[in-house]
Amino acid sequence: MSLRFFLLTIAPPVVGVALGYLLGGRLSGFRSIRIRALWLVWLAAGVQFAQYSVGGLRHFIEDTLGVPMLALIFAIVLVWLAVNLPRWPAAIRAAGILIVLGASFNGLAIALNGRMPYDPGAAVDVGLHAGIETPKNEPADANTRLGFLGDTIPIPLLRKVISPGDVLISFGAGALVVLAMRRHRRGDPLAESSTAEEVNHEPDVELAAHHRSDLHVGRSGDAALHHRRAVDRR
Amino acid sequence: MTQTVTWRRITLAAFTLATLALLLYTIGAPHEHGG
């Protein structure tokens, strides 16, 4: 992975964090949503890395087992989204659906053409050689199907060509960060417990109530006398 | 104690953001080679 590619992948969440702070959110808002099975995304990234760097493994999975590595990667990520989407709040779910839509656009273009087609003209525009084939990309030609879903959008600053699906995934990832950060202000139970930790400076103390339903208004005699020091009782 | 919480939050946030970045690495398909 080149530095430019790294910048391209890290940009959406980083821009999301900056926007989140500008809109009054905090990173602690992430505590209010539960993200399950993160290991699946890391597994998909591991498979992705392997297809570029471990030639023998790619040959074994694709040629011997007959499973396209890109299909394997997309399946793992879509399972992760399927596990998480139903449990997320509606707005964050909408951001997740954008990611699914983007992945579907990319997946469709790859499935129909074998690899992600890219516009050779756009590649030349950003200073790349046209006609190069990689494990993930191939130049579009007259036989390419749904070429408009391929890499057609040049990003000269990063010398990359991205697809409409990439735009949706980037926008969805950035929006997910902003929306999660803004939940810091919603008075969410878990976010409240995090605030309680800040105020009490006792994060490891088990809180009495984790949910609003566990709280009660108390009575006049409910004062926590056991916390009084001996000097207070005199 | 507060420092521990701060580091826990930073770790959680960094891990989540890194995971989102990996989404683009996995299901994103930008063309980059051949330059």
Image: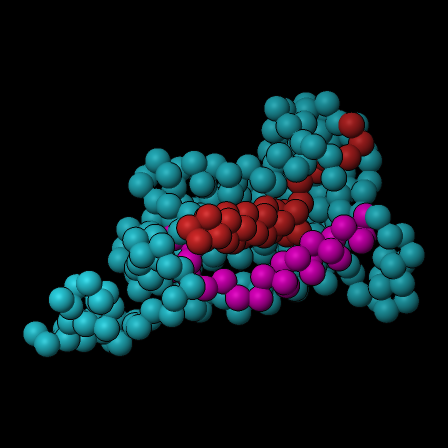
| Along the viewing direction, whichever of A182 and A47 lies nearer the viewer | A182
| Along the viewing direction, whichever of A181 and A2 lies nearer the viewer | A181
Residue A190 seen anywhere in this rendered image of the structure: yes
> Quick one: which chain is cyan?
A
Image coordinates for residue A94, horizontal then vertical, percent = 41, 56
**Which residue shows up at 40% across the image and 60% down it?**
A203
Image coordinates for residue A208, horizontal then vertical, percent = 30, 73
What segment carries the magenta color? A29-52
Q: Chain B is drawn in which colour?
A: red
Image coordinates for residue A155, horizontal then vertical, percent = 61, 29
How many numbered dots are placed on residues in this image?
A: 0
**Which residue shows up at 76% across the image and 47% down it?**
A136
In the rendered view, would you say A40 is above or below A126?
A: below
In the rendered view, would you say A147 is above or below A230?
A: above
Q: In which quarter of the image is residue A202?
A: bottom left
Image coordinates for residue A112, horizontal then vertical, percent = 70, 55
In the rendered view, would you say A171 is above or below A57?
A: above
Where does the N terminus of chain A fall, quadrant-wise? top right
Q: Is residue A149 left or right of residue A73?
A: left
| Along the viewing direction, whichever of A76 and A103 lies nearer the viewer | A76
